[in-house]
């Protein structure tokens, strides 16, 4: 999970949400067209085009707008930009396991859910070189519950992470320790010419594994 720093909402979304007449009662179900498209793109750009939970690479066509706190639990947050994220799995396939926002569904527990908006979210999970995820502290019930509720340790995601990590482990013999440190630092940046505003998919898992080798 990569820490998300919220930015300003897009103007078209704010205009739609706040610019109606005094009787205007906007609902998320009414959001459509350019305001919704602009909102979705803003969330993706804010997150560096990776899923808010698992960190796989996403775009508008294969992601959806996710409510951190589900609408049925707090309707006042349904159109609160700080409660909106971009999650993978826009469409589900019966033969494929669900994970992240789709699997989370209507679940939310402030005492157990590790939020990608939390400053400590990245440090509460640990990854191994084979792509598995676990709570960094075995006594952290929130991290363990979040992994379970979001399906972060299903075989599909383990395989994706393993492939991403192995791609970097394969080059270790050809770079110096100093270059390895620079590589790890680069994985934590998105706003560079090389990345064009996107994080490397599963960057936080790759960086954590590589740090153990520095």
Image (cartoon, rainbow, N blue to C red):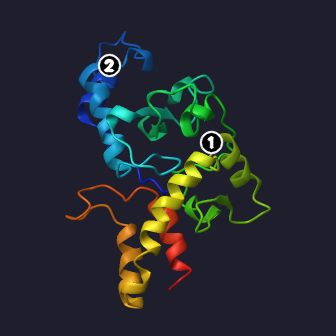
Within 10 Å of the Cα at label 1, are there few (<14), some (14-19), or many (20+) other Cα atoms?
many
Is residue 72 in view from this perspective?
yes
Q: In this view, does 135 lie to the left or right of 203?
A: right
Q: Is residue 207 above or below residue 59?
A: below
Seen from this angle, which residue lies furthest top? 23
Mark 1 or mark 2, which is nearer the start of the sequence? 2
Tell me the residue that label 1 is attached to. 150
Residue at the spot x=54%, y=72% of the render? 209
Could you say which quadrant of the image residue 97 lies in?
top right
Q: Which of 115 and 192 is in front in this view?
A: 192
The reply to whether residue 112 is in sight is no
146 lies above or below 181: above
Secondary element at tag 2: loop
Left or right: where does residue 43 sit relative to residue 116? left
- Expressed as whole percent of the image width and height from the top left, the position of residue 3 reads 48, 57
- Front in this rendered view, residue 53 or 152: 152
**Gap in angstroms between the C-alphas marked 2 and 1:** 27 Å
Identify the element where label 1 is drawn: helix
| Dot in front, 2 or 1 | 1
Q: Do the residues labelled 2 and 1 touch (CB within 8 Å)?
A: no
**Could you say where residue 200 lies in the image, as x and y percent from the top left?**
37, 59
Q: Nearer the viewer, residue 107 or 210?
A: 210
Residue at the disc numbered 2: 32
Residue 213 is situated, as x and y percent measured from the top left of the image, at 53, 83
The percent coordinates of residue 178 (x first, y second) are: 38, 89
């Amino acid at each position: 999970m990569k820490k998300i720093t919220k930015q300003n909402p897009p103007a078209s979304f704010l205009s739609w949400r706040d610019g109606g007449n005094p009787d205007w009662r906007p609902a998320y179900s009414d959001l459509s067209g350019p305001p919704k498209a602009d909102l979705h793109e803003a969330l993706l750009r804010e997150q560096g085009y990776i899923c808010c939970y698992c960190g796989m690479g996403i775009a508008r066509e294969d992601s959806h707008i996710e409510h951190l706190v589900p609408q049925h639990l707090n309707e006042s947050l349904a159109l609160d930009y700080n409660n909106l994220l971009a999650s993978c799995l826009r469409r589900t396939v019966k033969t494929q396991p669900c994970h992240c926002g789709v699997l989370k569904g209507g679940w939310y527990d402030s005492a157990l859910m590790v939020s990608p908006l939390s400053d400590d979210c990245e440090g509460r999970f640990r990854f191994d070189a084979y792509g598995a995820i676990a709570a960094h502290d075995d006594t952290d019930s929130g991290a363990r519950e979040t992994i379970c509720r979001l399906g972060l340790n299903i075989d599909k995601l383990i395989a994706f992470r393993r492939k991403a990590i192995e791609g970097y482990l394969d080059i270790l013999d050809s770079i110096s320790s100093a270059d390895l440190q620079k590589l790890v630092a680069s994985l934590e940046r998105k706003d560079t010419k090389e990345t064009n505003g996107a994080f490397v998919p599963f960057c936080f898992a790759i960086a954590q594994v590589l740090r153990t080798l520095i």
